[in-house]
């Protein structure tokens, strides 16, 4: 072990021989070294900061659509925040497309006993598609875990499109209604179709006359836009942000009250004279019959997630809005959505 000798303050005063300046500086440096060594020793002797046990050991996320869609991004973003923050030990993901999300819902219900470790992401379409009979189930057939976020809707066009605003899109539509198709990652009468209809109606057009082309999930719909198959795409704002930042698409309208910080270049519908706003909630459901203790653990992990920097990074990156409700609050929220959306769809002729 290296030993460092130091002089006492008294020896400095009483030694007959004068102390050189170099010796004083050596003493000061030595004291600093000793202090630093003591601090380091104290630091390394302290127990490591305790890392809290995960609230949930693992979660398997079931995603009812393909890669690249809003459900996919929500499940993977939530899993990222939960695991990086230590609230969940590990996360896995499974994309199960089909039936407008109905295939995954049916699978979760039919295999309920073996799916207690699974959370399925869903959103407003679970309400819409049960109302329109796309699948026979509704949210009441599942265990309601938590609503988590809201995602604004957006209308986007390809980077090389001559359309640069909602005004341009409306002009193209008026000139050639059948040739100005709007696509989306949902079935006819689904979420993306409904948003396109809402926007066109607010702009003074006949919402039922809009040519809507459906694709299975947002990723395929975005590919159709980039290939020129459709003139514009109705999609989730978060799905469009990264492509817009990369210069692949132009966001010509977002259904927020004011511009969203995640991509401030995107104008709102309102500022372009189209008086409509909309936010699509997303949340998580479990298999029917989930044990109460496991439901509580899932809800606790999600509730704690909101206070973590890992979640804020994911949320801000995607431009999401925090909309958290669990249990009975989640059910009341869904029942309110069911009524409001049902009334709107009747008005637009979808029911």
Image (tube, rainbow, N blue to C red):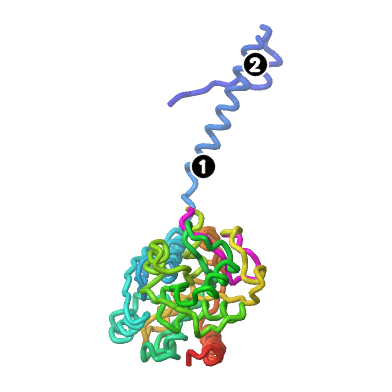
Q: Is residue 61 left or right of residue 155?
A: left
Q: Position of residue 184 (x, y in %)?
A: 43, 73
Upstream in sequence: badge 1 or badge 2: 2
Secondary structure of residue under mark 2:
helix
Residue at x 56%, y 78% (from the top left corner): 200
Quadrant that contains the N terminus? top left
Q: Position of residue 129 (x, y in %)?
A: 42, 86
Q: Report the residue marked by disc 2.
A: 24
Q: Is residue 332 shown to the viewer in this render?
A: no
Boundaries of the magenta span:
247-262
Q: Report the residue marked by disc 1.
A: 43
Q: Position of residue 16 (x, y in %)?
A: 68, 8
Disc on res. 300: none
Q: Residue furthest right?
A: 13
Q: Position of residue 213 (x, y in %)?
A: 41, 76
Q: Residue furthest front?
A: 175
Q: Is residue 322 left or right of residue 273?
A: left
């Amino acid at each position: 072990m290296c030993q460092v000798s130091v002089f006492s303050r008294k020896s400095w005063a009483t030694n007959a021989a004068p102390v050189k300046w170099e010796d004083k500086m050596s003493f000061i440096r030595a004291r600093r070294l000793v202090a630093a060594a003591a601090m380091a020793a104290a630091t390394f002797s302290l127990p490591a900061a305790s890392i809290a046990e995960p609230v949930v050991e693992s979660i398997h996320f079931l995603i009812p659509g393909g890669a690249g869609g809003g459900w996919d991004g929500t499940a993977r973003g939530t899993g990222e925040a939960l695991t990086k923050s230590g609230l969940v030990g590990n996360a896995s993901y499974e994309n199960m497309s089909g039936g407008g999300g109905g295939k995954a819902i049916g699978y979760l219900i039919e295999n309920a006993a073996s799916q207690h470790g699974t959370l399925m992401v869903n959103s407003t379409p679970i309400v819409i598609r049960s109302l329109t009979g796309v699948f026979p189930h509704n949210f009441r057939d599942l265990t309601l875990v938590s609503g988590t976020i809201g995602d604004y809707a957006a209308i986007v066009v390809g980077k090389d499109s001559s359309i640069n605003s909602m005004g341009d899109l409306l002009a193209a539509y008026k000139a050639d209604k059948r040739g100005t198709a709007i696509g989306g990652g949902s079935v006819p009468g689904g979420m993306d179709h409904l948003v396109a209809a809402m926007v066109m109606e607010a702009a003074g057009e006949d919402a039922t006359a809009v040519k809507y082309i459906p694709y299975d999930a947002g990723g395929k719909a975005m590919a159709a836009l980039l290939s020129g198959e459709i003139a514009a795409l109705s999609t989730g704002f978060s799905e469009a942000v990264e492509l817009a930042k990369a210069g692949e698409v132009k966001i010509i309208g977002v259904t927020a009250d004011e511009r969203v910080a995640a991509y401030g270049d995107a104008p709102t519908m309102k500022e372009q004279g189209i008086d409509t706003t909309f936010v699509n909630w997303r949340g998580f459901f479990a298999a029917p019959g989930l044990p109460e203790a496991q439901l509580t653990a899932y809800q606790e992990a999600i509730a704690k997630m909101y206070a973590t920097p890992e979640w804020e990074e994911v949320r801000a990156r995607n431009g999401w809005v925090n909309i958290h409700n669990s249990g009975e609050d989640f059910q009341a929220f869904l029942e309110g959505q069911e009524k409001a959306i049902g009334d709107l769809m009747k008005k637009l002729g979808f029911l």
